[in-house]
Image: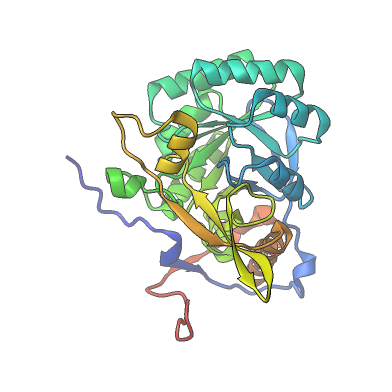
Amino acid sequence: MIIESDLKLDFKDVLIRPKRSTLQSRSEVDVDRTFKFLHTGGEWTGFPLIAANMDVVGTMAMAKALSRFGAMTALHKHYPAEDLVAFFRDTDTTNVFYSLGTTEADYDKFQHVKAKAPVGKVCLDVANGYTERFVRFIGRMRTENPDLVIMAGNVVTGDMTEALLLAGADIVKVGIGPGSVCTTRKMTGVGYPQLSAIIECADAAHGLKGQVCGDGGCTVPGDVSKAYGAGADFVMLGGMLAGHDECEGDLRYEERDGQRIPVAMTFYGMSSDTAMKKYAGGVAAYRASEGKTVEVPYQGPVEGTMQEIMGGVRSMMTYIGATKLKEVAKRTTFVRVGAQLNTVFGG
């Protein structure tokens, strides 16, 4: 047994210290970034935000909506193969990841889709990215698909970030347990504070010229800013994008003034009872649910939320004098705090 006593931090533990700046307006900053991927050598330019590959959020409608902002979507892996073929064939999928697990059925389905439509990016998604099987699967994907941009995870430590990049990943997904509908930490006791995980994994990845995607833990636009400040190249969101028209959760309606209007939408973790009953017939005897099902307020089109997130990031950049998003991590100084908000009138 080992106890690590050095400080580990989460988003709630810090604020970003402002710095002298010559910027006059949010309109002067550039929130797009250009990345060159480690193994393919290809480049991508856009706002590096990714909708999570959860079946409520990682939808085809979300992909089309976020693409208008230059942002990305990791489609959930439960779409029928022919629906995916049609989507990748008929849509500009520059900003879209095809998601799959590590089973032979997952791989066969991917090969079927890729044979019929252009798939340029994949998200290899498992709860535990520390297994040798996962590392071997990444190697197989890289060997058999040399031109594919591969995002893989999840891990929370620098050593495993390096291992996944060396195996063939271009982007490593960082986060175990920080998600709003994830109960992994409660059920297993396993996890890592998300801000420190991003800092440590980003440091490891950038030494190899790879990228990291901070996955989970963001609850407000300021957390997205902190993730970029910690070194995240991409930030993946689930709960913050839930409840919108582009999602596929069940809506709850109420009667108001004689009209039936939507007020809430279901949202659940992909290891929850809800998801496992939907896709696997229930929770297997050898495991436990590691997710929960909640209702989130109905929020209308995702456009408004994206404007809030991007506006928050732009404002952060003016506070620290960063003209370009790629400068944010170098210009960020975190200050440890005991409280962040004045909640006298509520949270």
Percent across and percent down for residue 1 are: 17, 40
Q: Is residue 289 above or below residue 24?
A: above
- In the picture provided, is 2 more to the left or to the right than 279? left
Residue pictured at 63% horizontal, 31% vertical: 79
The image's colour scheme reads rainbow
Note whether 68 is above or below 19 in the view shown: above
- Name the residue at 47% across, 39% down: 275
Q: Nearer the viewer, residue 106 or 18?
A: 106
Q: Quarter of the image holding residue 135?
A: top left
Going by the image, does 40 lie left or right of 214?
Answer: right
Total marks shown come to 0
Name the spot of residue 276 as percent of width and height, x first. Answer: 43, 36
Residue at (72% x, 15% y) in the render: 115
Q: In the rendered image, which quarter is residue 78 located in?
A: top right
Whether residue 44 sits left or right of residue 247 in the image: it is right
Residue 128: x %, y % from top left: 40, 33
Q: Indicate the quadrant where residue 113 lies.
A: top right
Q: At x 35% / y 41%, what residue is drawn?
A: 289
* Residue that protrudes farthest toward the left in the picture: 1
Q: Which residue occupies the extreme front position in the image?
A: 258
Q: Nearer the viewer, residue 97 or 15?
A: 97
Position of residue 3 measured from the top left corner of the image (x, y, whole percent): 21, 47
Outermost residue, bottom direction? 344
Foreground: 84 or 263? 263
Decide if residue 29 is in sight here.
yes
Residue 180 in sight here:
no
